């Protein structure tokens, strides 16, 4: 077996770094900035085993050491990602990809499955029963924009943002399926707070604030962004409708005529306003 160092070409000893496609000797590890073999943590060795020499080069060239490699390995492991995403793919996309099989196995409608996959949903921990129930809740004009799980009042809920509303579903032992809705049109503000391992989203509608806690730290900012985007979309058509309509010119002139008759404005002021309204 060829265990030559990919950098210097020398035969490597036991103390070497095993990459996906070859080995690097102890002294080349040090020279490339990875750090010494002795201080390389288990996680960093695992990281190396999942990466190619090319990826190792890119990694160390950007100033990263074995310590960073160990951290990266642990981060992905904690997020439940088994296969390492290549550098062209974002973490969110990698997580969504690893969820596709799980979604396809769920006991829900094909349409819901298709929409969850299209929305790149990945955090559906402890909400399988709620997902199964989802087809009964969604109407024909609604599409899932994003979904995740989160904690409300001490219980884990499925949180779904559609193009029309925010839906909260929680299977409750006593009352069965519990559902709450917040139409996007009544939401005034969405705030996202990052905690160490999770995130909290607060949705304000009028005087009510709904805090969704313990959302997966990668999913939380995506959910907050999605709600904001969908909120804006529901508000846009109304605004542009008003602008397009503009003032009713004859009506406006009549209003000013009344003001003139009541001697609130002068003839001159009336004439000027009339000219302006008629674009003369
Ligand atoms: Zn070497």
Image (tube, rainbow, N blue to C red):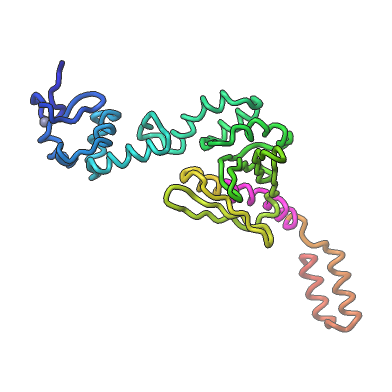
Q: Quadrant of residue 254?
A: bottom right
* Residue at image location 38% in from the left, 34% down from the top: 88
**Image coordinates for residue 164, horizontal then vertical, percent:** 69, 44
Relative placement, left or right, of 58 versus 147 is: left
The N terminus sits in image quarter: top left
User: Looking at this rendering, what residue extends furthest in the left direction?
Assistant: 10
**Closest to the observer, 94 or 7:** 94
The C terminus sits in image quarter: bottom right
Is residue 173 depicted above or below 248 in this figure?
above
**Closest to the observer, 245 or 60:** 60
**Image coordinates for residue 93, horizontal then vertical, percent:** 46, 35
User: Looking at this rendering, what residue extends furthest in the top direction?
Assistant: 1
Where in the image, quadrant-wise, is ligand 1 located?
top left
* Residue at image location 26% in from the left, 25% down from the top: 20
Q: Quadrant of residue 37?
A: top left
Relative placement, left or right, of 213 versus 138 is: left
**Closest to the observer, 89 or 274:** 89
**Image coordinates for residue 218, horizontal then vertical, percent:** 46, 43
Is residue 246 depicted above or below 98 in this figure?
below
Range covered by the magenta-colored residues: 226-243
Q: How many marks?
A: 0
User: Looking at this rendering, what residue extends furthest in the front direction?
Assistant: 174
Q: Main secondary structure of the magenta part?
A: helix
Relative placement, left or right, of 25 versus 213 is: left
**Image coordinates for residue 253, horizontal then vertical, percent:** 85, 69
> Magenta stretch: residue 232 in it?
yes
> Magenta stretch: residue 7 in it?
no
């Amino acid at each position: 077996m060829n265990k030559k160092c990919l950098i210097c070409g020398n035969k490597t000893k036991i103390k070497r770094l095993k990459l996906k496609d070859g080995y690097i000797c102890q002294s080349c590890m040090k020279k490339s900035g990875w750090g010494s073999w002795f201080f390389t943590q288990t996680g960093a060795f695992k990281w190396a085993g999942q990466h190619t020499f090319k990826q190792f080069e890119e990694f160390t060239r950007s100033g990263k050491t074995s310590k960073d490699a160990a951290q990266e390995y642990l981060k992905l492991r904690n997020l439940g990602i088994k296969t390492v995403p290549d550098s062209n793919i974002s973490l969110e996309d990698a997580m969504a990809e690893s969820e596709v099989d799980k979604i396809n196995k769920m006991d829900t409608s094909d349409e819901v499955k298709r929409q969850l996959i299209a929305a790149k949903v990945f955090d559906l921990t402890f909400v399988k029963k709620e997902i199964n129930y989802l087809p009964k809740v969604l109407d024909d004009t609604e599409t899932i924009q994003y979904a995740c799980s989160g904690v409300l009042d001490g219980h884990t809920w499925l949180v779904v943002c559609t193009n029309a509303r925010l839906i909260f579903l929680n299977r409750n032992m006593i009352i069965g399926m519990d559902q709450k809705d917040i139409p996007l049109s009544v939401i005034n503000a969405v705030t996202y707070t990052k905690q160490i391992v999770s995130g909290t989203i607060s949705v304000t509608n009028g005087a009510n604030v709904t805090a969704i806690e313990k959302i997966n730290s990668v999913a939380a900012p995506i959910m907050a962004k999605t709600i904001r985007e969908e909120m804006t979309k529901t508000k846009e058509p109304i605004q542009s409708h008003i602008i397009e309509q503009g003032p009713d010119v004859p009506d406006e002139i009549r209003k000013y005529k009344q003001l003139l008759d009541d001697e609130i404005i002068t003839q001159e002021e009336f004439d000027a306003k009339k000219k302006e309204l008629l674009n003369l």
